[in-house]
Amino acid sequence: MSAFTDHRQTVFEVELHNQAVRECVKENRSHDIFDDRWADVQTREIAACDEIKALAMIENTYPSCDGFVVDHVKRLG
């Protein structure tokens, strides 16, 4: 965690994948935009005041309309 992190925030571990990429990989194709690694679960750490804000931040960066799916959210620390 950064020294500049707001101490009122909590770090959340978010696991997500891209369903569109997963479907392409199953068909032995590559997605036009996203790397094949998105077929597998990827982990990101997000600092937010609560889980709802963390999920909103993830949605902003990895939108569900682009095929991203959150598999799991865990509060760290």
Image (cartoon, rainbow, N blue to C red):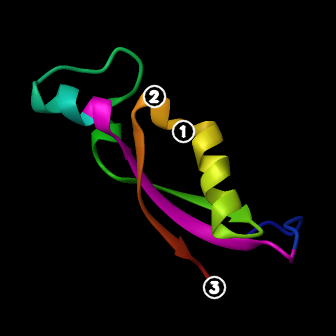
Return the residue at label 1.
Answer: 62
Return the residue at label 2.
Answer: 66
Q: Which residues are magenta?
A: 7-21
Q: Nearer the viewer, mark 3 or mark 2?
A: 2
Quadrant showing the C terminus? bottom right
Estimate the spatial distance between the alpha carbons at disc 1 and disc 3, rounded to whole Å: 24 Å
Extreme bottom residue here?
77
The amino acid at mark 2 is: Asp
The amino acid at mark 1 is: Tyr
Numbered disc 2: secondary structure = helix
Left or right of 60 on screen, residue 13: left
Q: Answer whether labels 1 and 2 touch (C-beta < 8 Å).
A: yes
- Give the tally of numbered discs: 3
Q: Residue at x 17, y 20 (%)?
A: 29
Is residue 36 at least partly visible in the picture?
Answer: no
The percent coordinates of residue 41 (x first, y second) are 34, 52
* Residue 36 is covered by the magenta coloring: no
Q: Residue at x 29, y 47 (%)?
A: 40
Numbered disc 3: secondary structure = loop
Taking depth in this image into account, of 43 and 52 the one nearest to the observer is: 52
The percent coordinates of residue 7 (x first, y second) are 86, 77
Estimate the spatial distance between the alpha carbons at disc 1 and disc 2, rounded to whole Å: 7 Å
Numbered disc 1: secondary structure = loop
Q: Residue at x 74, y 64 (%)?
A: 48
* Residue 20 is covered by the magenta coloring: yes
The amino acid at mark 3 is: Gly
What crowding class fits label 1: few (fewer than 14 Cα within 10 Å), some (14-19), or many (20 or more)? some
